[in-house]
Amino acid sequence: MTSPRQLDLPTGYTDLLEGLKQDVRAARTTALRIINTQLIELYWSIGAAVRAQQQAQGWGSRVIKRLSEDLRAEFPDMTGLSPRNIQYMTTFAGAWAEGPIAQQGVAQLPWGHVTILLDKLKDQTSRDRYAAAAVEHGWSRNVLLNMIMNRTLERTGAAPSNFVQRLVGPGTELAHQIAKDPYSFEFLGLSGEVAERDLENALTTRITETLRELGPGFSFVGRQVHFDVDGDDFYVDLLFFHIEQSRYVVIELKTGKFQPEYAGKLNFYVALVDDVLRRDHHNETIGILICGTKNDRSVRYSLGRSTSPMAVAAYTYDKLPAAEQQALPDESHLTAALDWAASIDE
């Protein structure tokens, strides 16, 4: 007797099977997303109702505890009705007070992501930005936490550059989002002074973490990428390709303070990559110089006459001892200080 696995399959069977598999996966993903959104809507509505009673009648923790007990008695198979979680719900409803919540980006995130946004960010604009980024890039809960603690979005687009002057078209604004300032290389576990080659080695050895710090869309091309210019040898420290923006990104590393001549060298490398590797369907190559320290005014003078689109950023990799970290101001104070400084600079 012929088993089902031994049948001669008709023409088109394999294509049909693959198509059905994709349909099932898509349907399951959609179903999970709908279920998650409904749960977020439920938590928001519970939080809004409790918050209204807190404001009207001064409900305290004892009432919320009793409410939790009664709800869990009625729905014993349902998790997430603890007093602590109900308090999260009220905070959630207060943070995103404008409904309907289903139409906001945060409704597409799992509840664990939402609690991180509530715990780690006090500014609502920052919560919305990180929520939108987490949805767009599919960040896991741990990645979201890492991005918040490293102030990733606050650093994105902050590096001094000449992109506005040297790039043309709608990609100009997107190019700004490639360069951060400063870059955080704490994951390397380095301290003190290191040689540029050692820093380069460490970044490429930990390429997964490096790509995460650079941001979404980066693909690693190579290190010490060789170019022969009529017998003269040149080596680009790190070369990446940004898939979403379809452009090469040249990164040069300097462990010391920025010097104007560094911009000239990077300008040369960007022009070289643009001429040798770039294809007609690619956008312009950009360069990012990452150095130990910099004087922003010197950077702007240096970039002003450069012919290639470039940015200059600093980096950090020293991780402070726990006692010193505790002595630092909290995130809300830092954010306020940075906002104040930016307003004065403008």
Image (cartoon, helix red, strand yellow):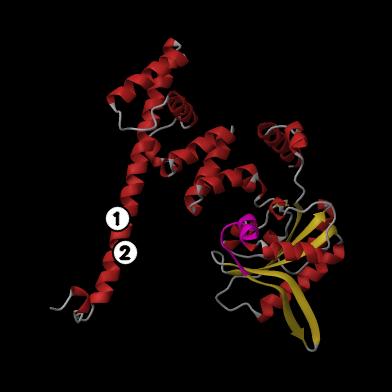
Q: Position of residue 212 (x, y in %)?
A: 61, 56
Q: Secondary structure at mark 1?
A: helix
With 166 as the anchor, is 90 left or right in this view? left
Which image quarter holds the N terminus?
Answer: bottom left
With 82 as the anchor, is 220 left or right in this view? right
Which numbered disc flags the more N-terminal residue, 2 or 1?
Answer: 2
Q: Quadrant of residue 2?
A: bottom left
Q: Position of residue 276 (x, y in %)?
A: 67, 81
Q: Is residue 201 visible?
A: yes
Quickly name the residue at label 2. Answer: 22
**Furthest-top residue in view?**
57
Amino acid at dot 1: Ala
Q: Which residues are magenta?
A: 208-220
Q: Position of residue 203 (x, y in %)?
A: 70, 62
Which residue is at a point 58% across and 39% down the rendered structure image? Answer: 126
Amino acid at dot 2: Gln
**Furthest-left residue in view?**
1
Q: Quadrant of residue 104?
A: top left
With 114 as the anchor, is 276 left or right in this view? right
273 to 55, vertically: above or below: below
Q: Nearer the viewer, residue 40 or 324?
A: 324
Q: Which mark is residue 13?
A: none
Q: Quadrant of residue 300?
A: bottom right
Which residue is at a point 35% across and 32% down the rendered structure image? Answer: 42
Separation of disc 2 and disc 1 at Cα? 8 Å
Check disc 1: other Cα within 10 Å, few if <14, some if 14-19, many if 20+.
few
Q: Which mark is residue 27?
A: 1
Q: Secondary structure at mark 2?
A: helix
Which image quarter holds the C terminus?
Answer: top right
